[in-house]
Amino acid sequence: MNRAESRPFGLPSAAALVVANMVGAGVFTTSGFALADLGSRRLVLIAWVVGGVLALCGAISYGGLVRRITESGGEYLFLSRTVHPAAGFLAGWVSLLGGFTGAIALAATAFESYLFPAGPPGWLPAGAAAIAVILLTGLLHGALVRLGVAAQNLVVALKLLFLLGFVALACYLGAGDGWPGAALVDESRGFVLTAFAGSLVWISLSYSGFNAAIYVAGEVRDPARNVPRALWLGTLLVGAFYLALNTVFLYAPPPAEVAGRQDVAALAALTLGGEQLELAVRGVVILALLSSVSSMIVAGPRVYARMADDGVFPRFFRPGAEGAPPRTAIALQTGLAALVAAVSQLSELLSYLGFLLSLSAAASVACLFLIRRRDGREAVAGTGFPFVPAIYVGATVSLGLLAAVHRPAEFGAAVVTVLTGLVAYLQLRRRN
């Protein structure tokens, strides 16, 4: 078996990884918090549209990057090779503490909230179910990588099928008398730019998995061709899907019940079909969140393994052999995510992760401008240069700054994360 044949990811598996990363906790929790901030369901849907357009710009731009650098490693590798090893290390640090650790904890925490809507039973401590799903998934991907990929693809297919069925059923049930919440008037409070930016940062977290395939590029067959395709195909599919889902989530129940609610999918199902439909939808969401945890435990450790290969992270995080999963890095990722799941709240994680991931992605896309300057226009062919990457970088940075005004505490936590990364880089560099 040659090296290309031994790679476990083809175009369908890479696209499934993108879909699994995107369709996670954010889409099932964000609209309730966004509606509480904005007071208008129409504005929330507009924010989902804007987020989708930005994600597609990001996917196209990342496709250009991965055509140049076809190895696993994601933002760490792009920034290390294009800007400076310190910039790459910071991106990897953000992935370690926020991009994957926090996002896995977010998905697992939402998993528990859907599994136990009234809170866990008395004999089970809060957070135990979230921690258990993280540990079990890490064990699967650390021991049996090919079985893990096959299971991942199956779960993604099932969750999309079931969620599309829910949207179709919601449309059918609303065809007669309409949805109960559709005719009700939203609370009017006007458009507030900082609030809209803050909600869009939350929503950008739901789209952030558009770049998932880059983290396993070195394990994808024909990565220069298949990874860019997986990025924009997965992003287009999920963007359309998000609009359909959130229309149901926002307009089926009364808006006063949706605002501030974290399990909006279950609320919409209860409104439309009673307890039986709510129970069925909770099961589908649980499946979706399980696949989200799984996909991030696949992607994240590949970044730390690459950093270890490059000597900017402890050597024992490298994979043991060619084609083997990075088991030590998977163990690190699993342990950190379980710890964060035990101590964090859902809404806090949404804002914190939104800041970190959007700014890290913007820095990576900005590498295209450096590549264009050094190597010429042909080096960035197919990226819509300069308009597509400029739209993504400019909008992402602007939204991050506006959202920082609206939620300074979470922005401060993101800044602290970056500063601790600088300290860690200097210490590791001195030691090496």
Image (spheres, helix red, strand yellow):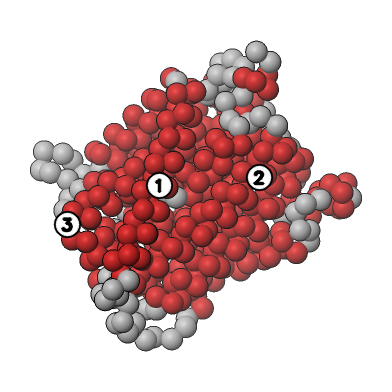
Q: Are marks 1 and 3 in contact (CB under 8 Å)?
A: no
Give the percent coordinates (x, y) of residue 406: 46, 72
Residue drawn at (38%, 31%) of the image: 137
Q: Is residue 102 above or below residue 300?
A: below
Amino acid type of the residue tagged 2 in the rendering: Arg
For the residues marked 1 and 2, what is the alpha-carbon distance in whole angstroms?
Answer: 22 Å
Residue drawn at (57%, 26%) of the image: 8
Residue at numbered disc 1: 161
Give the percent coordinates (x, y) of residue 120: 17, 45
Residue drawn at (50%, 46%) of the image: 19
Give the percent coordinates (x, y) of residue 169: 32, 59
Residue at numbered disc 2: 229
Amino acid type of the residue tagged 3 in the rendering: Glu
Front residue of 215/241: it is 241
The first of marks 1 and 2 along the sequence is: 1
- Relative placement, left or right, of 226 versus 174 is right
Residue at numbered disc 3: 275
Amino acid type of the residue tagged 1 in the rendering: Leu
The first of marks 1 and 3 along the sequence is: 1
Tag 2 secondary structure: helix
**Furthest residue toward top:** 1
Front residue of 309/22: it is 22
- Relative placement, left or right, of 77 versus 172 is right
Give the percent coordinates (x, y) of residue 36: 34, 73
The first of marks 2 and 3 along the sequence is: 2
Q: Is residue 86 above or below residue 242?
A: above
Front residue of 299/92: it is 299
For the residues marked 1 and 3, what is the alpha-carbon distance in whole angstroms?
Answer: 21 Å
